[in-house]
Every structure is written in C-alpha cells, then in structure tokens.
Image (cartoon, rainbow, N blue to C red):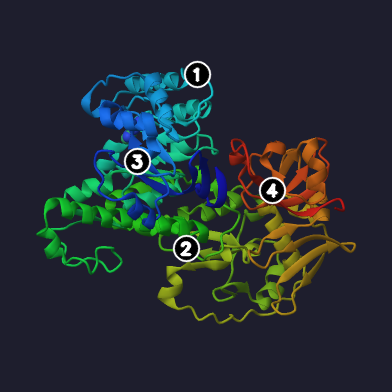
Amino acid sequence: MDLIHREGLARVAKFSTPHGIISTPTIMPVINPNIRTISIEDMKKMGMEAIITNSYIIRRNDDLRNHALEKGLHDLMGFDGPIMTDSGTFQSYVYGDIEYGNIEIVDFQEKIGSDISTILDIFSVPEDSHDKAEKAVDETYRRMTELSGERQTILAGPIQGSIYNDLREKSAKLMSGTKAGYLPIGGVVPLLEQYRYGKLCEIIINSKLNASFDKPIHLFGGGHPMFMGMAVLLGVDIFDSASYVKYARDGRLLFQEGTRDLKELMEFPMWSPIYGKYTSKELRESPVEERTKVLAHHNLFTIFMELKEIRERIYEQTLWQYVEEKSRAHPALYAAFKNILKYKGKIEPFFELYRKPPLYYFDESSECNPYFERLKKFISGNPRFEGQGNHVPEGAWQPSRLSGKFIKEQYEKSSSPYFIRWMGIDVPVELEEAYPIEQIIDTAHYMEYPSHEVPEISPSKKEKIRDFDLEKIRTLCDFQFGRGTGREVFPDGSEITKSRATGRIRTVSMNGKFLATMRAHDGFLGLNIEGGKRLLNARKYPSNRVVVNEDSAEYNAKGYNVFRKFVIDFDPDIIPLNDVLVVDSEDTLLAVGRAMLSGIEMATYSGGMVVSVNHHTKER
Ligand code: GUN
C-alpha cells in the first residue's frame, strides 16, 4: 500500500494490481456476469476503479467459462481495470458443499487473468463455537499455504474467526505471514445484515491491528454507506457489495445515513442521479426491471458519494468527528461507536501528533477522542502535574492565549501546575498553543458566551521563579519526545525569540545555535540538528530514533528522505508526524525529520517514505 494521507488507522492510499492502480478507500461493485444492472461505463462515471465478480459462477456456466478461458476475464466483464474474483466460499456457505477444491479454484482464477484471486476460505458464522471457528481459521490458513509457486495474480487470504477476538487476531497474524497480498475480513455478512455494528467494529479492530499494514484490508459485503465511515476509521481500505442491487430489487434506496422505502418516499433528493428524471410515483409504477436499474443507479451513486466524503474527511482529518456525528443516526451505530471507544487506548498510537481542524466537544464521548486520550496519558502519573493543581481563572485564557498578566503575576511566581479546564479534562497551560488543544471548541463556549474579560489579577509580591516561555517549550518537548526530555534539551539559559507580529515563540537556541523552532502551523516543536543531538543524549536507544543501514546513511546525512527498505530499527512508540532522529547503526545522528508512520506501522510496511527529513548533518 502506498500511503498518501492518513488519519489514525484510516488511510488514503494506492494499491497496484496488474490492471492498474486502485485508490482507496473505495468499493468494488459486485457484478454478476449473468446480469448487468448498471453498465461499466456508468459505474466508471461514478468513480468505480475496480470490480469484483465470482469465479465460481463463471466456472459453472459453459459460455462464461469458455469466454473467460479463451479471451480472458477482462474481456468477459468488458472492463480493462482491476478485477477481483471470489472463490465460491459464500456459495458453499449458503448452498452447502461445492464441487471444486481450493487449488483448482485458485488456478482457474489465475488462468482467466484475475487481478486478485480469493482462496476457498471457510466461512464461519457468528453462532459457531470457538472450537469450530478455530478449526476454520486453521483450515483457511492451510489452504493458503498449500498454494505453491509464484503466482501471476494477487492472492486474497481471508481473515476468519467468527465473533472471537482471539481468533480474529490469530487469523490476521497467520494470513499476514503468508504470500497473501490482500486481506479480506470474511464471515461478517450475517452481522452486517443484523446491524450488529458493535461486534463488527471489534472484529475489524482485532483483525486490523494484527494484520500487516502493507496489505489492503477488505470488508467482504460491507457496502452500506451508513457504516462505511466507521469501517474506514478502523482501517478498512476496500469494500465490496451487491447491496446496491439487492436493495434496489426490494424497492429500497440507500442514503448516507440509512435506507428508505420507495413506497414511502415523497421526493428524490436533488443530488440523486434519478432527480428530475422520474417522480417517486412514476418509478413506483414502472416495470420492475426498469425500477431496479434506476434504484441500483441511485444506490451505487450514494455509496460512491459517501466514499468521496470519507476520503475528504481523511484529508481534512475530521473522519473521527464525522463518525461521531453519524453514530447518532442509528442506535446500532451509536452502540458501535461506544464499542470503538473501548479500544481508544489501542487506536491512539496511530493518530498523528496534531490535527489542524478544531476539535469539537459535544459530551463525555468526545473525551474518548484519541487526542484527549493522548493528553490523559501524558498527564497521568506525571509528577510535574501531581499535587495541588490550580485552574486558570475564568477568562484569563481566551481561545487561545493566556493573558500576560496571569503569566507574570501568577504562573511565573508559583511552582505549582496550572490547568485549563475543559469539561472533564485538565490541560497543562503550557500546551495552550499545541493543536488541537489550541482549537478545542466546546458546547459550553456556545451555551454561556463567556465574556473573555481578563479578571483582575492583583500584583503579587513574590519573586519570579520560572519562565513561562521556557516551561512551554519544555512541556512540549516532554509531550513529543518523552518525560524529562524538556529540561535536557532546553537547559536554563536557552534563548527564546518571538514573533513581533503575533508575540508567539519562534525559535529556541543555545550559544547562538538553533535547537528548535515552534511551528506556527501546529504549535509543536520542530527540532534542529543541535536540538536533535541533545535529544539523542537525553534518550536511550532506540527512543525517538529511526535507524538506517549504511547504504542509506550517507544520503540521509545529506538531507534525502528515509525510505522503509533501508530502515533496520526504530522506536515502536513513534507518533506519526512527530519529529524523529535519523541515526546510523552506531547511533550517530544523521538527520532530523518528520515520521510519516507510527512505530507500530513501521514494523509491517515494506516500502514507502518513513521520514521526511528537515535538517541534516552534512553538506549535499
Ligand atoms: N463473501 C462474503 N463473505 C465472504 C467470506 O467470508 N469469504 C469469501 N471468500 N467471500 C465472501
């Protein structure tokens, strides 16, 4: 997977297949080779880049089989882009045993030129016992490993395991270690049909967190737009679905937040491709075939529209918030969102150091946002913030700066911690400018319209005992690079410059050498080489480091970015978009730059850029 943009586990990425690149997240419309409800051309206009069809159906039908064997699958389907084929597993789940074996089925898919071929996995249903589901996981794994030789097709190895978290974990780990280049999450159709989204979220999380990040995660059958955002947030890249046709046959229309019945629908929405072509009454009275085609068109359009929104949200870094909002559309979704929150600790490490858009605070469920979670982790057990904490007096903190008077008369004359209070969370005042803290917008703000008047803070006779700007830099450093690093990297005597226009900190230096800058766009620190050297001394190996091999070291020292294939070790706790130290195998500093992946992801991505270098030690 070629990562383009990210928000936590959600990613905009590119996946290469023999017939072209698939941009994710996306959906592969299911096309039955016998029935064409929507033309390929019309699908392309909606944004379709890949389709899925069933090799079992093709194989059982003489005409289809002969066509596919003679002229290829792409000719048969009338599509020259990426085509995935399924194996007949679902048919064997619905109708009982099928007549072909695993190897035969995969060989057939390869022979007809399928881009992504699925093994004959064992479909476990939610009611299966743990024992039965485990046997299915083991047998599915065996079937993947029995496939020999190099293949001209990408193999899809489904992750099974029914509703059991430990089995999903096992299956994901096993499959990731095989030559499967594509990982669908299987056995979930019954859960989707029953709106058991909470369980589904658990399945996705347990599969995703134990699967290779290098391979696309596909959700078999998960094509209802009301759930897609949630699935993408948890790391699903590709969906497939026949829902657009199935719902159309039942006279139902998909909307981004649910489903409506044509019988009850008064008007078509203006965004729909049906709008202006039919009235709902006309469509109700149309022959069933025509009606199905028209509704399928609307349904598939809705799915692609939702995917567009999801991709936009990832670029904007507001997918979490979108999912939080959408979860109020149905109790099943809200229950699922609550279930996701149980995993907030596991999801948090994948979130970027900062996000630019404001963070909206609605109620206590907003506190489970990964950014709040990270803050809580930072504060809890940290001696700096223990003991008698003070809250900044009402009004002394305006979005988003503390009043100078408060700093001079209270903060700098005290040694105790001060917090800005937001609903349930105390945020250390020193982090006031870091995103998204700087940007939190809570409901109380709108309910009470605070005056923002700076309260009377009477001059204190005490002496100044600390410097707010230096404490700010040190606290940011502790937050970004680990507890206690602030004092080491920015010792007493560090010189701080500020912008004349905004009064904000710009640079920190020592004896005329820059240590770091405080970035205007996110309020965090960007290290310079001198700051990097000090951090290197302050932290034990491999903390904050990405270690490169000898082939790469010279280039990185000259300022070239770091690519995964040259990385030999790294800190597993790296936060995406945080600065890291690029070192060689002797732990000599080569460069500092921004990590593109979390440490957890670095373990399984095999390619791509992992550090965008900002400062380097040698001349080019
Ligand atoms: N289609 C829907 N669910 C599944 C599944 O679990 N495995 C396969 N191969 N296809 C499916």
Distance between the alpha carbons at the discs numbered 4 and 2:
36 Å
Which-is-in-front pick, marks 3 and 2?
Answer: 3
> Is 215 on the left or on the right of 196, as rendered?
right
Q: Position of residue 243 (x, y in %)?
A: 27, 46
SS class of the residue under badge 4?
strand
- How busy is the neighbourhood of tag 1: few (under 14 within 10 Å), some, or many (20 plus)? few
Dot 1 or dot 2: first in sequence order is 1
In-front residue for pair 574/104: 104
Task: Tell me the quadrant of the picture where the N terminus can be found.
Answer: top right
Q: Disc 3, disc 1: CB below 8 Å?
A: no
Q: Position of residue 170 (x, y in %)?
A: 46, 26
Say what amino acid the circle numbered 3 marks.
Answer: Met
For label 1, the residue is 148
Q: Disc 3, disc 2: CB below 8 Å?
A: no
Dot 4 or dot 2: first in sequence order is 2
SS class of the residue under badge 1?
loop
Dot 3 or dot 2: first in sequence order is 3
SS class of the residue under badge 2?
loop
Say what amino acid the circle numbered 4 marks.
Answer: Val
For label 4, the residue is 611
For label 2, the residue is 423
Which-is-in-front pick, marks 4 and 1?
Answer: 1
Which-is-in-front pick, marks 4 and 2?
Answer: 4
Q: Position of residue 534 (x, y in %)?
A: 82, 50
Distance between the alpha carbons at the discs numbered 1 and 2:
58 Å
The correct choice, above or below, for 466 with respect to 592 in the image is: below
Distance between the alpha carbons at the discs numbered 3 and 2:
56 Å
Q: Tally the marks.
A: 4
Dot 4 or dot 1: first in sequence order is 1
Say what amino acid the circle numbered 2 marks.
Answer: Met
